[in-house]
């Protein structure tokens, strides 16, 4: 094979490789880097609403300044009620982050132990939840307890629980 032929094959391979790699570029992230950020928090919220969120609230607390709230979108889209700083939204899985931080702080302050069991905290669940005496808080925080996710119950989102007791009953039903 001649030197020119090898060069031509290499160029074709590089071109094809480049073309294929464009498929794997994270375009939304690239756009975020290219386009300038909005000048205000409110503009940023409006941009977020443009990505399909129903409503958003942001709390900004900078040292030495009054805390500020910003809201955008809908508190209730169907009734056309705009979001405001007092609107309530379901936070779903993001709540796990807040739980983990709170638990970490309590463990750090030695007010809570990751090695205590479910039975230590809720003795009334012994015999109602399998292995309650072996499931530790550490396992619960890591989502390794074996306790089923009650939101996976059929039609849960059509008729969600209204209280902690109802949620616990959904879990307990899965152990029967």
Image (cartoon, rainbow, N blue to C red):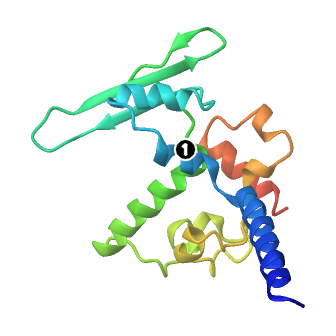
Looking at the image, residue 137 sits to the left or right of residue 161; the answer is left
The residue closer to the viewer here, 95 or 122, is 95
Image height check: is 96 above or below 59?
below
Q: Report the quarter where the C terminus lies.
A: bottom right
10 Å neighbourhood of mark 1: few (<14), some, or many (≥20)?
Answer: few
Q: Give how far across and how far down residue 45 sits, in percent.
A: 45, 29
Q: Is residue 17 visible?
A: yes
Image height check: is 125 above or below 131?
above
Q: Quadrant of residue 10?
A: bottom right
In the current view of this chain or complex, which residue is farthest to the right? Answer: 1
Q: Quadrant of residue 173?
A: bottom right
Q: Mark 1 sits on what residue?
A: 31
Badge 1 marks a residue whose secondary structure is: helix
At 42% from the left edge and 77% from the top edge, which residue is drawn? Answer: 113
Q: Quadrant of residue 172?
A: bottom right
The residue closer to the viewer here, 135 or 102, is 102
Q: Give how far across and how far down residue 61 sits, in percent.
A: 23, 40
Q: Give how far across and how far down residue 72 sits, in percent.
A: 46, 22
How many numbered marks does the figure carry? 1
At 72% from the left edge and 64% from the top edge, which residue is drawn? Answer: 18
Looking at the image, residue 72 sits to the left or right of residue 130; the answer is left
In the current view of this chain or complex, which residue is farthest to the left? Answer: 64
At 64% from the left edge and 34% from the top edge, which residue is drawn? Answer: 162
At 86% from the left edge and 45% from the top edge, which residue is drawn? Answer: 154
Looking at the image, residue 16 sits to the left or right of residue 21; the answer is right
The residue closer to the viewer here, 136 or 128, is 136
In the current view of this chain or complex, which residue is farthest to the bottom? Answer: 1
Q: Is residue 88 visible?
A: no
Q: Give how far across and how far down residue 144 sits, in percent.
A: 66, 74
Q: Report the quarter where the N terminus lies.
A: bottom right
């Amino acid at each position: 094979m001649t030197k020119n032929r090898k060069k031509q094959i290499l160029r074709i391979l590089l071109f094809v490789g480049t073309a294929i790699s464009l498929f794997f570029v994270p375009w939304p992230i690239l756009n975020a880097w290219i386009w300038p950020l909005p000048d205000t928090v409110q503009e940023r919220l409006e941009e977020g609403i443009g990505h399909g969120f129903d409503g958003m609230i942001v709390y900004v607390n900078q040292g030495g300044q009054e805390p500020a709230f910003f809201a955008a979108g809908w508190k209730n889209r169907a009734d056309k009620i705009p979001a405001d700083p007092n609107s309530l939204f379901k936070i779903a899985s993001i709540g796990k982050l807040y739980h983990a931080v709170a638990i970490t702080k309590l463990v750090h302050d030695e007010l809570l132990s990751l090695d205590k069991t479910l039975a230590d905290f809720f003795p009334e669940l012994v015999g109602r939840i399998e292995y309650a005496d072996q499931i530790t808080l550490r396992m619960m925080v890591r989502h390794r307890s074996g306790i089923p996710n009650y939101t996976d119950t059929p039609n849960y989102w059509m008729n969600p629980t209204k209280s902690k007791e109802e949620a616990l009953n959904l879990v307990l039903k899965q152990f029967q």
